[in-house]
Image: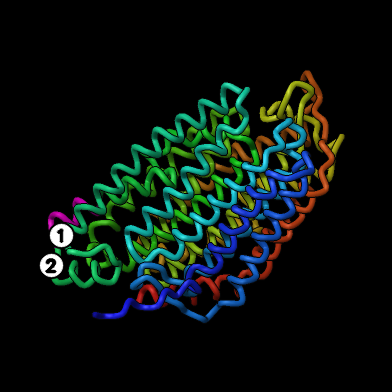
Amino acid sequence: MIPAPPVALGALLPALIVFGTGVLVLLLDLVPPRTKDHLGGVALAGIVIALLGSISLWNHETRAFRDMVLLDNYALFFHVVICYAAALAVLLSIDYLRRNGVESGEYYALLLFSTAGMMLLASAGDLLIVFLGIELMSLSLYVLAGLFKMRLASGEASMKYFLLGAFATGFLLYGIALIYGATGSTNFDRIAAAAAARPRDTLVTIGLGLLLVGFGFKISSVPFHMWAPDVYEGAPTSVTALIATGSKAAAFAALIRVLTVALRAAQPDWSVLLWAVAAVTMTAGNVIAIAQSNLKRMLAYSSIAHVGYMLVGLVAGGVPGAGAVLFYLLAYTFTTAGAFGAILLVERSDGEAVEVGDYAGLARRHPVLAATLGLFLLSLVGIPPLAGFVGKFYLFGSAVRAGYLWLTVIGVLNSAIAAYYYLRVIVYMYMREPEGVEVRLVPSFAGGVALAIALVGIVLLGVMPAPFADLAQVAVAPLLR
């Protein structure tokens, strides 16, 4: 009898810390005191410990469960990005939940379980782990999107997110089944060996297409983006920040590893397809965002456009292209979480201030907040010396070096289009008089800390990008050997 191989739980250590903290939060929710403010601190502590643990494990590769789970530098880089996104979401949530009369311990538990699923996705070395990570992440987010039970838009967001997410999972599973049927394995390395031995296999090509449909829903690329605007608008703003940052980072982590490791032999097929998807996603996201008067919907279409930019790096391929995507995700996480955090701290007498007109004259009443939101928007435009500019420079530079000149031209033109709707908000804040009901700034120490961290992040990544860009390339290089 062959003894069973030892279980190396070290490969799951950061994710287990976050998951264990989620279980602890559920248990603490059962005991006094009745107020749940302390649970936010417990959740934040667990995420910070997982973040520090991920940093300490750099350059210590661990494999477990017959190479189904990989804790390499690539996974650790994404663990850091995801933990930053989750920590900012928790900081934004602490006062926001109390203000909206939703002080429930299960909120933090679900946020932590979702974060654990994101981290599992980043460590996936097998299509089955990809599926498990996506489900753990998504099921928690479906519930969080509908947290405000008394708001019709929140329930609608949760239902749409669930139905379309389940639809996408069907495509993903069917693609996994076809690839397993063609290669006899769900492990990335074995799929790569089998696909290289049988190039242009029809089943592999069809399975690849179905996988891209499933991932397209998760990253909200066109034409699988229809859920994003309604979910971003209806979900609690702190949850929207996590969906826009952490879930996208996790989905891209799995997508890049699947394409560059498991399906590298099919690169001529998927690079052509992603070229078209990137161009359409950038253009549709930016053009539709121009017509939005609701800031959360505008940022939803903006995030769709940013997915198109990141796909440019994936099409460019190689270490420069994939490394640029990793750097851009880090910059995008700080910028987008900061933008949603600034929106979360402003409210009208009858609810959240989410219309562009609500921000008219904000610079006169709250100059610091207006300047902070303005910097996040300028980073999203790609104005130097902020992180968004450097991220786009790396992405478009990798595309030019790879010979994708026309795709780069489309990306640059889309960045110019995007400047209109981002700068419109800044114009309202600094050059318009208040319209109707004036908004007020909601004091929040935790929210202020989150904004400060995000602001330092976008400035640091813009002024000193080289160390972080080098780390991103070091992380991705082993995948492309």
Instruction: State left or right for residue 353 relative to residue 480.
Output: right
Above or below: residue 370 compared with residue 56 = above
**Residue 464, position in %: x, y?**
67, 70
| Residue 357 sits inside the magenta stretch | no
Instruction: State left or right for residue 296 relative to residue 129.
Output: right
Residue at screen point 58% across, 54% down: 332
Residue, far top: 436
Residue at screen point 45% across, 77% down: 62
Which residue is tagged 2? 198
Which residue is tagged 1? 182
Range of the magenta residues?
200-208
Task: Work out whether residue 74 or residue 408 is closer to the camera in this orientation and state it.
Answer: 74
**Residue 442, position in %: x, y?**
82, 36
Tell me the amino acid under the disc marked 2.
Arg
Residue at screen point 46% across, 50% down: 136
Task: Work out whether residue 474 or residue 400 is closer to the camera in this orientation and state it.
Answer: 474
